[in-house]
Image (cartoon, grey):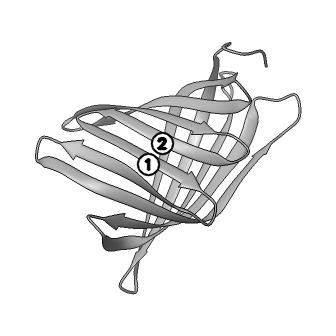
Amino acid sequence: MTADVQTPVKIHLTTNICLDGEEETFEMILFGQYYRKNNAVFLKYDEVQEEGTVHTLVKVDDEEATIFRKGIINMRMKFRLNEQKDGSHASEYGSLLLSTDTNKLAHHEYDDKCEGKINLGYDLYMQGTHAGKYDMEIQYREETGNL
């Protein structure tokens, strides 16, 4: 893949959230774009919700990952292994300070293919209060029309 060439991909996003002994799993199948730039991988996709659309950009490199969401909500979350990173969440209801304490950050990409997997494990804090232990997996592969 050359820099800035966007390739259509199918994305399978799974998020497990554990809080106060309760566990919840969310899964989404999305279609988006993949590209590489400055040694980082980018995934762009839209989440269509009842209230409106959220444009999401996931950036991952050797050291960290960042998730940007823009639309009916605006969010920025950073992830760096064994570090706590500040982020933000804003909606029509107001703004919140977010922070992530990352215990897992892995990106595996298959050679010469637009296919891979991003794994994130982190504790999420909202306004300093623990909001759950998250385990997120983002699988992606080139959309060829016959998946």
Res. 59 image quadrant? top right
Q: Residue at x 12, y 41 (%)?
A: 92
Q: Position of residue 132 (x, y in %)?
A: 39, 72
The answer to whether the residue labelled 2 contacts the one labelled 1, judged by CB atoms less than 8 Å apart, is yes
Q: Which label sits on residue 129?
A: none
Residue at coordinates 61% horizontally, 30% vertically from top-left? 42
Residue 4 in the image, given as x and y percentages of width and height: 66, 14
Label 1 environment density (alpha carbons within 10 Å; few <14, some 14–19, many ≥20): some
Q: From the viewer's perspective, tell me whether residue 37 is left or right of residue 70.
A: right
Which residue bears the numbered disc 1? 77
As helix, strand or loop, the secondary structure at mark 2 comes to strand
Residue at the location (67% across, 32% down)?
41
Q: Residue 78 appears at what percent x and percent y?
A: 49, 49
Q: Count the marks: how many? A: 2
Q: Which residue is mark 2?
A: 67
> Residue drawn 34% across and 74% down?
130
Question: What's the CA distance linking mark 2 and mark 1?
Answer: 5 Å
Which mark sits nearer the N-terminus, 2 or 1?
2
Is 10 located above or below residue 124 in the figure?
above
Query: Which residue reaches farthest bottom?
Result: 21
Q: Residue 103 versus residue 15: which sits nearer the camera?
A: 103
Residue type highlighted by circle 1: Met
